[in-house]
Image (cartoon, coloured by chain):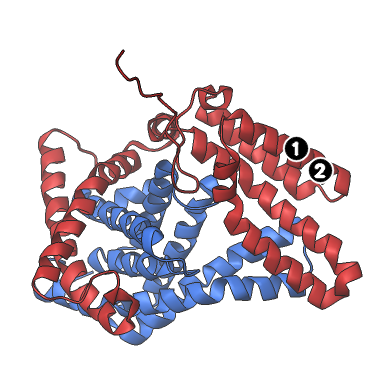
Chain colours: A blue, B red
Amino acid sequence: MSFVKRFTLQEAICLGFCASLIVITRGGLRLHLNVPGHAMFFTMFFLILGRGCVPRLGAATLVGLVAGLLCTLLGMGKGGPLIILKFVIPGLIVDCAGIIYSGFPESYVACGIIGAIASASRFLTIVIVEWVIGMDWSVILQHAAISSSFGVLFGAIGSLMCPPIVRRLKASGLITRDP
Amino acid sequence: MPFKRKSKPRQAGYAFQYSPNDSPVHRLAAGWKLALCGVLGALAVAARVPWALGVLLAVNLAYYFAAGLRPTDLWRDIRIFVIQMAIILVLYVVKFGLAEGLWPGIRTGVQILLLFLPGAVFLRTTRGSQMMQSLKRIMPERLSFVLFTSLRFVPFFAREFREIAMAQRLRGAPIAPRQLWNPVHWKDLFNCLMIPLMVRALKTAREAALSAEARGFGGMK
């Protein structure tokens, strides 16, 4: 957990606020929509936006960790404390992408690809849980594909909303230009 | 004689939300409930034969109802898994046929349900403050500061979210829930709502950090 030390207090609080906004939008969507995977729309948006606002390694993971803990504390989402993984794994993927291409929050193509890959982490979670239970491999893969396909779609669309916002925040001097 | 309203325990309207009650499960420490989650989850993974699954299902249901929760709460909590169970069952029957695919499909669906049900009881019976107490003991100080600051600001940002949305709608922005079904308006949602919200978040983060540093919260860069 010492990775929190790499951020200034302001950066850490800002990332915490991105997590708060994930929780608020999840709560808001729960009232209005019943489409599977729709929560990935704002989750991916704020994970990538967090990485765009604080261009340091671990930013998206911290957003994911805090969002997962907040969801657990507020009793949101299925699976109890396991929900933390649903936010941390996409956050880790976003941070790994940041190692390869640090300027991705400003690129539509990169955001779309990374958003889709990170949203597909739900596929991985389902595969692990069902493999542990001892399900047949072909059924696991089919079920994971059905369950995660909408999430991938919504996650990719949510990620595509990030670049113009990061650019505008940078242009107005609200977030730093240099990583 | 003055009319007295009977006070019923308030029931949470959504799945997995805290249900206030005075049951033995509510009184159990959060750490013990988490440990129970782990044990019952592990047993759900290990149980393969019908009698073991039946016993485990009975234990889970007893645990659930010992928390003073109602069958309507149970339905709210498990309906998402019922859909998953139906998908799994259909996939098994399609692949192996009705005779061979029925039992593995039911078994797997029940196992998944049993894996997640103790987590639902944990969320239903543990107050946020109880969880915080437990988390404070195991989390580093810096992370807990960030977490509790974020939690403290959830109502603030929810209010900001509503106020900005209302102001933008009055100015003609197509961001009403009904209009957001149309993906054409999603860009407006981000331009009219998310940018002002992020500007507010960044400014509030700066003020909160200054305030915390002024009060002597140090140790960060």
Q: Local crowd at mark 2 within 10 Å, few (<14), some, or many (≥20)?
A: few
Type of the residue with mark 1: Ala
Using the image, name the chain to which the residue with label 2 belongs: B
Q: Local crowd at mark 1 within 10 Å, few (<14), some, or many (≥20)?
A: few
The residue closer to the viewer here, B9 or B115, is: B9
Query: What SS does tag 1 mark?
Result: helix
Which residue matches tag 1? Answer: B58
Q: Is residue B185 above or below residue B13?
A: below
Q: Is residue B9 above or below residue A60?
A: above
Horizontal placement of A81 versus B7: left or right? right
Is any part of residue A101 visible from this angle? no
Q: Please provide percent x and percent y for residue B52.
A: 84, 43
* Residue sticking out furthest to the right: B99
Q: Residue at x 50, y 33 (%)?
A: B125
Considering the image in quadrants, where does the N terminus of chain B appear? top left
Contact flag, marks 1 and 2 (Cβ < 8 Å): yes
Type of the residue with mark 2: Gly
Q: Please provide percent x and percent y for residue A19.
A: 32, 55
Q: Residue at x 69, y 39 (%)?
A: B40
